[in-house]
Amino acid sequence: MGAGRFSDWDKQLNPSVARLWRRTFGGVRTRILAWYVLLIALCGVTSVLAVREILFMQLQERLETSLVREVRLFELLSAEEPVVQEQPMRERAAHIFDRFFYRYVPHDNEFMLAYIDGELYRTMPQKLDGTMRANGKLTSRWSHLRAPERDERTGSSGEKFLYIAEPLRLGGEPRGLLVAAYCVSCERREVERSVMVVAQVFIGATLLASLLAWIAAGRVLAPLRLLAETARSIGESDLTRRIPAGDRGELGELAATFNQMLDRLEAAFASQRNFISDAGHELRTPITIVRGHLELLGDDPGERAETMAIVYDELDRMNRFVDDLLLLARAERPDFLFFELFDVGELTDELYAKARALAPREWSIEARGSGRMVADRQRLTQAVINLAQNAVQHTAPGDRIAIGSALRGVWVYLWVSDCGPGIAPEDQRRIFERFERGSHSRYEGSGLGLAIVQAIATTHGGSIQLTSVPGAGATFTLVLPLDPPQELQLHNQLAGQSCSTVLSVYSH
């Protein structure tokens, strides 16, 4: 039983431990610190090894220079020694060595040995320490030298010595020998100790720098953790959380971009909720009407015919509503537009002729543009007819409605103007949204007409402008580019030719 409980506890604990492990040792902070420590370690090891080799090279050069300087001093002293005929050669050699040792300043790990007639006469230091005394093999070799020698040898104790042996010639014959030697191994051990101290200081500094880097990385990456926590906490029911974008660097830019994405998501979800609510409301009314009339349907032929007429009318309204929704959905697809080259003046005449059939109004052409453009002719016709239908619904028989077009620079303007009641300033931005109507509108439509017009203008790379004064009518203007945007040309073809070909024909 105890084992089973432990197993259950372990299963419950493992996900938390794994999550903590991933956050502590598997995150960006740990990877940054690992690379940081690795780079510092590589640079440190390389630097220490390079410093060690440089110090060894400088040590070797310094030792050789020092030995050469001492030997040259001995040569000068021996050359300056006056010749006394009655003085024995051994005394003369001893006098020269004494003068040299008087001027000689000993250094650490440096040894001076003077030989006269193969016998050790004097040393510096006066008592050889264990390092030199244990190397009888070398001292015995030097006692038999009669010629100059410069070499580096390992003695009996395993120590390595760099030395220069310079014979003392008196009367043309070698009567003595000066050996200047350095214990290279001893000097190198001192360098190694210094390098070891540097390495220890470097390791301590690296550990301290790693700790500071861990803390600094945590502070720098705090916006990323906040971003992750915000992303985990965001759901469809709560899109209001935002990340404080106080940093001006890349992380601040990331936080600002993430907040902008949340703004778009919040707007999209709100639009989706409103869309579902409004679509349900718009469809619920005709369904209720149809159901109510069918439930009350009697046997009288006249009553049945009247009821069926109402049912068919409501079904047609639902069908138009669904068609408008599908059209708005298609507006986001790249094949929504099919471009062609046409004359703006001819399009204006066609729009005027079609609009006149909508209702008995005082129709007129306010202006007629001269020139050609590349656009989707059918979609533009649909947009302008929608605007004309909107003008009809807000005017009375005999009221003036004008259609116009103009080319100004690289832009084409198509507009519909009426003398209706106008649109209140607070409604002028809102009426282009889906299912929205003016606050004083008498028309009970789906509220999708102006949204469709705006979608057509936007997909062309243009926009729609509204100029209205309450009580003085309204003017809706489509502002369209004379040439379609480059990205639209890549998705549309006309009669086997790309839009770029059409534009090249147009330019000629």
Image (cartoon, helix red, strand yellow):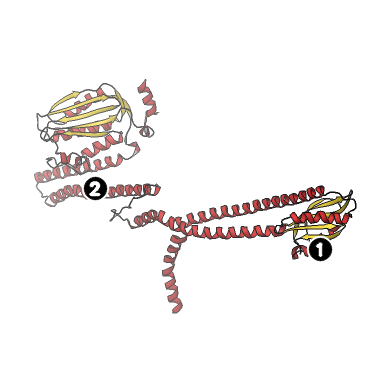
Q: Which residue was labeled with disc 1? A: 136
Residue neighbourhood size for the residue with mark 2, other residues' Cα within 10 Å, grouped as few (<14), some (14–19), many (≥20) = some
Q: Is residue 250 above or below residue 143?
A: above
Could you say which is closer to the camera, residue 341 or residue 284? 341
- Residue at 62 percent across and 54 percent down: it is 49
Quadrant assignment, res 331: top left
Q: Which residue was labeled with disc 2? A: 275
Query: For the residue labelled by badge 1, is the local secondary structure a helix, a strand or a loop?
Result: helix
Distance in Å between CA atoms under marks 1 and 2: 105 Å
Which kind of residue does numbered mark 2 sit on?
Phe
Residue neighbourhood size for the residue with mark 1, other residues' Cα within 10 Å, grouped as few (<14), some (14–19), many (≥20) = few
Left or right? Give the position of 248 relative to 49. left
- Residue at 26 percent across and 21 percent down: it is 370
Can residue 294 be seen by looking at this rendering? yes
Q: Position of residue 416 (x, y in %)?
A: 19, 30
- Extreme residue toward the top, this view: 508
Which kind of residue does numbered mark 1 sit on?
Gly
Q: Position of residue 1 (x, y in %)?
A: 44, 79
Query: For the residue labelled by badge 2, is the local secondary structure a helix, a strand or a loop?
Result: helix
- Residue at 27 percent across and 40 percent down: it is 327
Left or right? Give the position of 475 relative to 336. left
